[in-house]
Image (cartoon, rainbow, N blue to C red):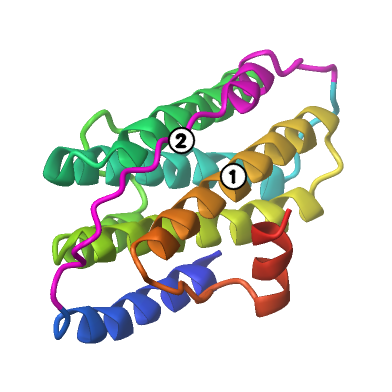
Amino acid sequence: MKTKQLLLQIAILAIVLVFSACSDSQKNDDLTFSDNTEEESLKNSAVLSVPTLTDVDSMGIIFMREEEKLARDAYLSLYAKYEHQIFDNISQSEQVHTDAILKLLNYYELQDPFIDIIGEFADPSLDALFDELMTLGAINLDSALVVGALIEETDIEDIAILAGATGVPNIMQVYENLLSGSENHLRAFVRDLNNRGIDYQPRILTTDQFNDIINK
């Protein structure tokens, strides 16, 4: 996961150089996003009787609590700046994600790293990453939508890694729901960018992984 964060930071720096030379798009079509099915699935996720967690499971749950918060905080901030509806809608979905992870933290009596301040995290690498994302997102609406797509790519990659490393049923269930939600979010951001004349290409996922998700 640390490697993926570094890759995302490098991608952001490269994209900043491109967008700093570009003007704002003239297209202003708002796309709404709603995923009630995802929200209900996460809210109703059953907490099953499971064995003691491994360190990888414990650390993964704690990390995902903050990574999902980063997504929520980013979209809340970008909505406040641009009032573009997709950020408001997906920020609400990300709140459901963070709440789903909180259920796991509470069930396994793990310490919650959540800091109830926008853009502040217990993990310093996420603090730095949030700042870089906001720098990119401040350029214009197009760059803000790219931030959304980058966040969702990273979430998909990290969730898939953690899901593959656990054999605990209720953790797998939550991760599968999170993964489905992040794929929906990625499709929404890419669709919005396409409507604005931008052909978004993956920076974190492989081209095959990206195309499989977009074409679902």
Q: CA distance from mark 2 to mark 1?
A: 9 Å
Specify the quadrant of the image occupied by residue 54: top right
Query: What residue is shown with label 2?
Result: 33
Whether 213 is drawn above or below 79: the answer is below
Whether 38 is drawn above or below 69: the answer is above
Closer to us: mark 2 or mark 1? 2
Magenta segment, principal secondary structure?
loop
Whether residue 47 appears in magenta in the rendering, the answer is yes
Front position in the image: 200 or 1: 200
- For this view, does 132 lie left or right of residue 180? left
Q: Amino acid at mark 1?
A: Asn
Whether 209 is drawn above or below 175: the answer is below
Query: What residue is shown with label 1?
Result: 184
Residues at discs 2 and 1 in contact (Cβ within 8 Å): yes
**Dot placed on the residue nearer the N-terminal end, 2 or 1:** 2
| The residue stretch that appears in magenta | 23-49
Q: Which mark is residue 65?
A: none
Q: Position of residue 77 (x, y in %)?
A: 20, 42
Whether residue 181 appears in magenta in the rendering, the answer is no
Within 10 Å of the Cα at label 2, are there few (<14), some (14-19), or many (20+) other Cα atoms? Answer: some
Whether 67 is drawn above or below 134: the answer is above
Within 10 Å of the Cα at label 1, are there few (<14), some (14-19), or many (20+) other Cα atoms? Answer: many
Q: Residue at x 16, y 46 (%)?
A: 82
Q: Position of residue 168 (x, y in %)?
A: 83, 35
- For this view, does 101 lie left or right of residue 73? right
Q: Residue at x 54, y 61 (%)?
A: 153
Specify the quadrant of the image occupied by residue 128: bottom left
Q: Amino acid at mark 2?
A: Phe
Residue 59 in view, yes or no: no
Residue 178 in view, yes or no: yes
Q: Assign a secondary structure to mark 1.
A: helix
